[in-house]
Image (cartoon, grey):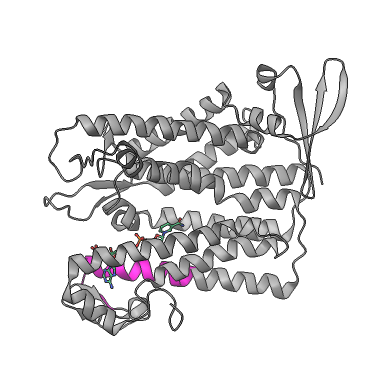
Amino acid sequence: MEAQIGMGGEMSRVASLKFGLVRLRRRKVEFYCHSSEGESVCGMDLNQLLYALIPSWNSVALLVSFFTYLAFAGSVLPGKLVPGVALPDGTRLHYRCNGLLSLILLVALLGTGVWMEFVSPTVISDRGLELLSTTFIFSFLVTLVLYLAGCKSHDQSSSLKPHVTGNIIDDWWFGIQLNPHFMGIDLKFFFVRAGMMGWLLINLSVLAKCFQDADLSQSIILYQLFCVLYILDYFFYEEYMTSTWDIIAERLGFMLVFGDLVWIPFTFSIQAWWLLSNKVELTKAAAIANCLVFIIGYLVFRGANKQKHDFKKNPKVLIWGRPPKVIGGKLLASGYWGIARHSNYLGDLLVALSFSLPCGISSPVPYFYPIYLLILLIWRERRDESRCAEKYREVWAEYCKLVPWRILPYIY
Ligand code: NDP
């Protein structure tokens, strides 16, 4: 199998050599470097890796085009206007949930561009490293601006009130304002949308590379299929995002911006890159088991999030066909929320595992995402517990007594 990553003309900007072809073979990366004198083969060393990471104007243009499209589509395309949760000052933000339409239109536009040969389907996978560094630099710069704007703000509304500790690193990392806006765009909502769409675009571009190399395995199909379903589902239920921890409780600093723009698209797609250079033969039983892990994980993840969302909207909503068990008039203690206090995390972890299982068990690399998510969700569950304990006090204590398991019944 051969994968070609044409680094194009901008490589000559960083070296006199032009890296025209990268050949990825079973965990071995070789660069075919050809200069004007002729062609030679050399291994990929640290210098070349660093060169590949240097942002080019092309990667800047790709990123700017993507953000411009998202800002435009997010503002003009129709979508349900969803009120966010009530903020401490009693106000609510409103979110236009048109992510699914924006995504479908974007993929259709890109598909047309590819068909008309305006756009290379592998443009993202060819520039993976430089797009990574460009996005990283953008995240850094934008959070500096957010930090400065936050420090200068005198707004006292809950969404814009500055929370300055005086520790520059702390304030830049965790952010100063809860929901900063730019030209009428809610930046937090915008960045998470960009990250999820970016993940899909990277995957599709890597898939195009597999097509190009005529190397489409069952593993690649399973991984791509699960991710497409998960991302489409995310945008289908985009309004549920408006009541998640990130949106309601986390301020917008480097941690969140980097997480949305760099971490989600570039690390969640590791399996796609890995499968590009590693062949895995799945048995029929393994493939079926893999599908089952995805389906069960998805049902628990989506079911739990949906039950909570519906309950918040209507505390009398039927849960699994029965009136809900409610504690203190505020907390749902039936359905998935009567099994564990964060069954939604369990579902998400199973789905994450199903993204990695197509890669087999020969390497830990494709398991980066589920391992990271396990650590993140345990940490987050602890933070959420202390927030809820403080907010709901004795009602929360009663809930914990009734539902003792945090994520996985009888284990944790
Ligand atoms: P939750 O959706 O679980 O939200 C927690 C909040 O829900 C609590 O603060 C509380 O808020 C409310 N709540 C908790 N228990 C109850 C209950 N029994 N009844 C009613 N309300 C309750 O957490 P997250 O926002 O962290 O996660 C949302 C989804 O996003 C999850 O499925 C998670 O797996 C996923 N996720 C994925 C990540 C990834 O990288 N793939 C990263 C982070 C999250 P309130 O004060 O409003 O009552």
Across and down, in percent, residue 294 comes to: 56, 68
Looking at the picture, tell me which residue is in the foreground, 324 or 339. 339
Is the residue 316 above or below the residue 160 in the image?
below
Q: Which image quarter has ligand 1? A: bottom left
Looking at the picture, tell me which residue is in the foreground, 154 or 200. 154
Is the residue 222 above or below the residue 144 in the image?
below
Counting every numbered tag in the picture gives 0
Across and down, in percent, residue 208 comes to: 68, 43
Q: Give the magenta range.
A: 298-318
User: Dominant secondary structure of the magenta stretch?
Assistant: helix
Is the residue 51 above or below the residue 89 in the image?
above
Across and down, in percent, residue 260 comes to: 43, 45
Does residue 261 appear in the picture of this structure?
A: yes
Q: Is residue 320 left or right of residue 290?
A: left
Residue at image location 42% in from the left, 33% down from the top: 140
Looking at the picture, tell me which residue is in the foreground, 82 or 162. 162
Does residue 102 appear in the picture of this structure?
A: no
Residue 310 within the segment the image draws in magenta: yes
Q: Is residue 400 left or right of residue 274?
A: left
In which quadrant is the C terminus drawn?
Answer: bottom left
Q: Is residue 261 left or right of residue 401?
A: right
